[in-house]
Amino acid sequence: LSSSSAASDVYKRQTLINEEDRCLILSENRPYWLMADLAVMNAGGISVPIFTTYSSNDYEYILNDCKPSLIIVSNNDKFKKIKNYINSHEQKVISFEKIEIESLLIKDIFDETNYEKKINQRLKRNMPACIIYTSGTSGNPKGVVLSHGGILSNCEGAVELIEPLTKMKKPIFLTWLPLSHSYEHTVQFIQIIVGAKVFYAESLEKLISNMGVAKPTIMTAVPRFCLLYTSDAADEEDS
């Protein structure tokens, strides 16, 4: 195949996701990440989000372990991290931007006019929704299967917890933790439930300045954020 349109035609004749297919997502935070994740799970597939900071050995281990039938990558830099561990002739590839091999561009999916919107009514709370892999700091990354019901239970509890905040004004979130992190992966669904406006931080280094632009009313955080914030505040006081 020598063009993206030819690749697109091939993909249109195939079923991209079958029930319980494992679909790997390797991307930095961006709106397409959320769209891809929701699409996979609505189709009955199992989303497998992975960190962009893994070592080559970790990528090789995860791809051999979960055996995804569909690979979703953001750009060529991310694709190069895993290209030696996939078989592009057997594993389908979707990319958000053009990459060095033929892939189905997400833009082509959005430009497709002959489609039907469907909500999968066959999904059950006890069905697997995603596999979250650990950071791999102590041995090989370990995959944890999360069910639709488990994620929904966390969302239901969180929505109730933050209700005093969301009732006061329309919530604004600034997302900065990796969406492949189990915490932030759940938060993205809470953002939808409460009808929040969502900003995506450019990087950890630009987080403080991004806060000034987004003016979030709610942010998720881990201890690293507290260290970053207190350090930045101390530097300002010293200056």
Image (spheres, grey):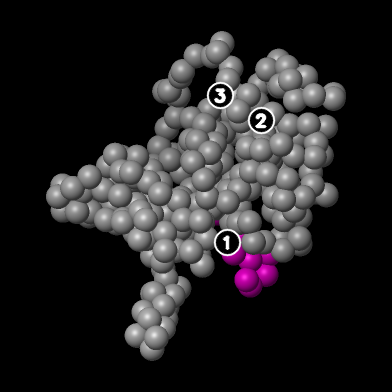
Q: Which residues are magenta?
A: 134-145
- Magenta span dominant secondary structure: loop
User: Who is closer to the viewer here, 221 or 92?
Assistant: 221
Residue identifier under label 3 = 110
Residue identifier under label 2 = 105
Q: Residues within 10 Å of mark 2 (few under 14, many from 20)?
A: many
Disc 2 vs disc 3: Cβ atoms closer than 8 Å?
no
Q: Amino acid at mark 1?
A: Thr
Q: Point out the image quarter for the N terminus.
A: top right
Q: Secondary structure at mark 2?
A: strand
Q: Secondary structure at mark 1?
A: loop
Res 76 → quadrant: top right
Expressed as whole percent of the image width and height from the top left, the position of residue 56 reads 76, 60
Whether residue 155 is situated above or below residue 11 in the rendered picture = below
Examine the rendering and report whether any part of residue 111 can be seen: yes
Disc 3 vs disc 1: Cβ atoms closer than 8 Å?
no
